Image: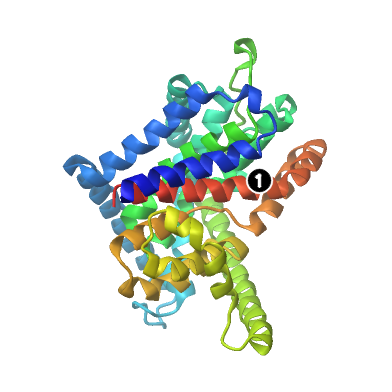
Amino acid sequence: MDIILGIVGIAVILGLAYLFSNDKKNINFKSIGIMLALQLLITWFMFATEIGAKIINGISAVFNKLIEFGQEGIGFVVGGFELQEGGVFFFNVLLLIVFFATLLSVLNYLKILPTIIKWVGGLVSKVTGIPKIEAFNGVNSIFFGQSEALLAIKAQFHHLTANRLYMVSASAMSSVSASIVGAYIQILPAEYILVSLPLNMFGGLIIASILAPINVPKEEDVVDVQDVSTEKSVFEAMGNGALDGGKIALIVAANLIAFIASLELVNWLIESVLAGVTLQQILGYILAPLSFLMGIAPSEIIEAGSIMGTKIVTNEFVAMLEFQPLMETMSEKTIGIVSVFLTSFANFSSIGIIAGTVKGIDGEKASIVSRFGLKLLFGSILVSILSATIAGLFL
């Protein structure tokens, strides 16, 4: 029954994307079928095979070890505070972003990440039929934030049509930065965070290929990637990475203060009119049908829907922090589905980040992004639902 429900859920998601497609005649169903099959294969391999489980455990162990190293640095700087579970969130979780951003910067300077992204992107393009620059951007978005991912292809922007611009923007919004993954793992189970990364990459390309199909002639399918690393030494890369990580940590902290406080304000206003009702409960009922199709048990769909809705109107960190204490009372399947859903940048604030980045690259293209901003969010939400539904099939 769960499998049938999951298949229906996937069909509904793809159907919604098809309904709002701006060019139904040019949808490449073969490419979409291949990517959907890859999503199913990856999830099955990670969740249902011994080798996949060992790979996830191995990657989790690496992240946990890196987190230990990061906490050593944090402990030295804020040694007057006791860093323990349930302690100061900014110190326990957000400052880890500084260390992970430093590692990414060094790997980028040493050309290790660019090489991996280039070859994996080329493989994805060859297997799926997605144009090279869009495939590269999809892989790039796994490692870097929305702004950095788009900056890497800024030399290609003058070639991007509206539909191609939609696809690269959708990839950036549907994924998460590797520099933040360490912080996520401190809140939610690592295996679900890690499996969501490839699922979201392919999901972003699938949904964008339906909503805004692209057809690039072979002679124009050339990768011209901008090298965004300007550091002259590994020490400069470390310094710049640390500064970037610090900025991200402060931005996340500022957003958490603003969104959580605003959420409390909105709930106070709602409760003054409807006693005992919160925005989260309203969102839970709105998203209940989709939660059911994703494979969440009927007894948990309202709570799960409220968490997912909170993520859409605020951000993933706010939702993760609300979800963390609820996990003790929820089934493992629901925990996995909701965790995968939460692992993306699909929220209202991301529209401004994407539009602002594009404006900095090409002001003319920024007006195009602004026009399809809500459609970009809609597509990214569908990606999160698709990834979570597929994960639910194997839980």
Residue 101 position (above or below residue 91): above
Residue at the outermost top position:
219
| Left or right position of 22 against 131 | right
Q: How many marks?
A: 1
Residue 263 position by quadrant: bottom right
- Looking at the picture, tell me which residue is in the foreground, 267 or 55: 267
Residue 179 position (above or below residue 52): below
| Left or right position of 127 against 215 | left
Q: Looking at the picture, how far across and down is residue 338, in whole percent?
A: 42, 60
Q: Under tag 1, what secondary structure? A: helix
- Looking at the picture, tell me which residue is in the foreground, 161 or 385: 385
| Left or right position of 59 against 253 | left
**Residue with the mark numbered 1:** 376
Residue 271 is at least partly visible in this image: yes
Q: Looking at the picture, how far across and down is residue 276, in whole percent?
A: 56, 87
For the point 82% across and 36% down, the residue is: 364
For the point 72% across and 28% down, the residue is: 161
Residue 177 is at least partly visible in this image: no
For the point 56% across and 51% down, the residue is: 381
Q: Looking at the picture, how far across and down is residue 249, in whole percent?
A: 54, 64
Q: Looking at the picture, how far across and down is residue 377, in whole percent?
A: 64, 50
Kind of residue at badge 1: Leu
